Amino acid sequence: MTTQLLERPATITVPDTEAGRFIVPATGGSSTVPTYRVGTPDIQCRYPVIVGEDQVIGRAYRWHRDWLVLTTEGERNLRRPPKGTPGTDMAAAHLAEEYAAGRIGTVPLDQVLAEAPTPLCGPVPLLHPRMPVNDRNTEGAQIAFAGLAAHHWRAVLTGFPGSDNHWYLNCELCDWEGPKFWSHLRGRNGEPPSARRHKGGCIGEDKVRRLIPAYH
């Protein structure tokens, strides 16, 4: 259990063992801030922040180290979180305060899920819609897609978002899918990437190394 000290009512993060999410109850300062939780990211790498059983007060996502929120009032850039504070925690606390103050509304989770894009049947675009089309980004995208193929990952919706932005990928060795950073998948400082691949450990590190030369 961890406690974050922010410039807002203190919050405590508690594991939600039923869904693998986080329950974040407000514990001080203002009794009007509701209990909320951060849901599983969608195919656009947006984390829903939920109050009650199924009311979404906003979605949070990262872009070039900034964290943004999308609510009934539109998109807002919260900039970077304080050092040591996860961006999802900062964004979720902000949304809970905005909702408690009556500045944003809710959307049923079922509606949010129904409106989410579906995976593309076939190749995805080369670049993410937020990425400018230029020579540098195009070259980086081509390198990244070649790396995905070598490491048995597949992009399911968007093109290359940059090395340090979430990219929703499917693992071709098992049925896992979720957001990853290309900078983590390609390996760092001359070292191969982690053979664990993703949460749950994929098919096992030894099998991964036997199947994919890039992990040696």
Image (cartoon, grey):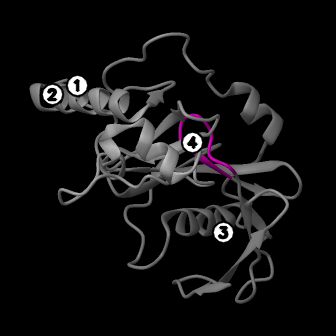
Q: Pointers 1 and 2 in contact (CB under 8 A)? A: yes
Q: Is residue 128 visible?
A: no
Q: Pointers 4 and 1 in contact (CB under 8 A)? A: no
Which mark sits nearer the N-terminus, 4 or 3? 3
Query: What is the CA distance from the residue labelled 4 to the residue labelled 3?
Result: 28 Å
- Location of residue 162 in the rendering, given as x and y in whole percent from the top left corner: 29, 40
Q: Is residue 46 magenta?
A: yes
Q: Residue at x 50, y 69 (%)?
A: 86
Above or below for 175 versus 204: above
**On the image, numbered disc 1 is attached to which residue?**
142
Which mark sits nearer the N-terminus, 2 or 3? 3
Above or below for 2 versus 149: below
- Location of residue 177 in the rendering, given as x and y in whole percent from the top left corner: 59, 38
Nearer to us in this view, 73 or 135: 135
**On the image, numbered disc 3 is attached to which residue?**
97
Closer to the observer: label 3 or label 1?
1
